[in-house]
């Protein structure tokens, strides 16, 4: 067994097609097929179920692929460690971010990241949190921006900032005449939430549990943008993270945002990477840059721009 065979194994698991896997590995299809068969003979089990038009992993194959990913990630980590010794802030870093924060955070922080690390190429991936964690554990990502906590002793997490939640209501809603509300008042309303798999849904459900609010049963959104459009259409209310709320000014005539008076619900955002990663020192420095989000972006009272004040609630 050698590393090349493990690379073929992972490629076939990813592509589920011998031709496409061979192309990805820059070898002929017979070469890849022969090496996969040789690996199966060496292990004494079938790793793939071969059908006329598709390839599927067997249970033994799933286990072998997971182990192969870890081995290949460790080897890449060894190469990366050697590269970092000579050029610690150069090269490539693969960063994952979840979709309810990526579009709102990255435009604000990427100019500072590029200025601080001019020789670093940052490859960005946007996925749901559970998929980011899988990629991070398997070595397909170097780091990921996630909501805390993440319970995995193999990962190191650096807190970045706390992002408050606001309540978004249509302009014709009874609450649209107010600037703030108490948490307990949420118990009178049903909230529109995201579908399963989004960490924002889990965070919103925690707020519902604390306040006594209920989830609306007739609708679950696939994205934060869909939730916003549903509120704009006057179809319900929802919790909106502060960074996403900054883009609501153009809709001030149709949407209203309220602060919470007594207990500010929020989510803690962090940067996570494998404890064994050779990129740890670099990622610590990257966390410092990501942590320097302008306070006004997270504080509804900190924005001076007139257009934004039209959408965001000010202090009473």
Image: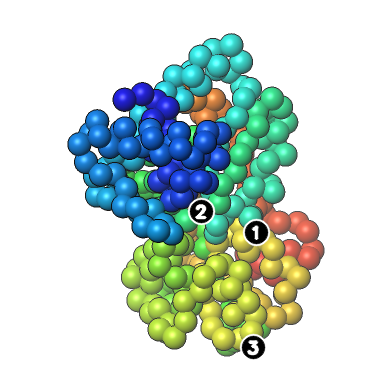
Question: Mark 2 highlights which residue?
Answer: 127
Q: Nearer the viewer, residue 158 or 166?
A: 158
Q: Nearer the viewer, residue 312 or 263?
A: 312
Image coordinates of residue 2 in percent, x first then y, are 36, 24
Instruction: Name the residue at 36% across, 37% down.
Output: 36
- The answer for how far apart the CA atoms under marks 2 and 1 are is 31 Å
Image coordinates of residue 246 in percent, x first then y, are 67, 61
Instruction: Name the residue at 71% across, 27% down.
Output: 118
Instruction: Name the residue at 42% across, 27% down.
Output: 4
Instruction: Name the residue at 53% across, 79% down.
Output: 237
The answer to which quarter of the image holds residue 99 is: bottom right
Residue 172, numbered label: 3
Question: Mark 1 highlights which residue?
Answer: 301
Query: With 251 as the anchor, is 34 left or right in this view?
Result: left
- The answer for how far apart the CA atoms under marks 1 and 3 are is 23 Å
Image coordinates of residue 15 in percent, x first then y, are 47, 48
Tell me the mark number nearer the camera, choosing from 1 and 3.
Answer: 3
């Amino acid at each position: 067994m050698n590393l090349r065979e493990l690379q073929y194994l992972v490629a076939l698991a990813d592509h589920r097609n011998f031709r496409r896997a061979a192309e990805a590995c820059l070898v002929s299809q017979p070469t890849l097929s022969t090496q996969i068969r040789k690996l199966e003979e060496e292990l004494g089990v079938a790793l793939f179920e071969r059908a006329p038009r598709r390839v599927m992993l067997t249970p033994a194959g799933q286990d072998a692929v997971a182990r192969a990913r870890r081995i290949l990630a460790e080897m890449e980590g060894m190469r990366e460690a050697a590269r970092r010794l000579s050029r610690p802030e150069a090269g490539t870093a693969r960063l994952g971010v979840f979709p309810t924060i990526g579009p709102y955070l990255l435009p604000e922080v990427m100019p500072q990241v590029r200025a601080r690390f001019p020789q670093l190429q940052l490859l960005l991936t946007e996925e749901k949190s559970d998929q980011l964690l899988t990629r991070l554990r398997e070595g397909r990502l170097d780091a990921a921006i996630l909501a805390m906590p993440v319970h995995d002793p193999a990962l190191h997490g650096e807190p970045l900032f706390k992002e408050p939640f606001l309540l978004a209501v249509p302009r014709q809603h009874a609450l649209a005449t107010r600037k703030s509300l108490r948490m307990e008042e949420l118990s009178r309303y049903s909230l529109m939430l995201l579908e399963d798999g989004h960490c924002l849904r889990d965070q919103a459900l925690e707020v519902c549990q604390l306040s006594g609010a209920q989830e609306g049963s007739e609708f679950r959104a696939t994205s934060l943008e869909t939730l916003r459009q549903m509120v704009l259409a006057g179809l319900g209310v929802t919790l909106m993270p502060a960074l996403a709320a900054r883009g609501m000014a153009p809709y001030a005539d149709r949407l209203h945002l309220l602060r919470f008076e007594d207990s500010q619900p929020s989510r803690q955002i962090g940067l996570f990477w494998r404890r064994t990663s050779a990129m740890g020192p670099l990622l610590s420095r990257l966390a410092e840059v990501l942590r320097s989000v302008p306070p006004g972006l997270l504080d509804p009272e900190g924005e001076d721009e007139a257009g934004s004040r039209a959408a965001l609630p000010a202090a009473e």
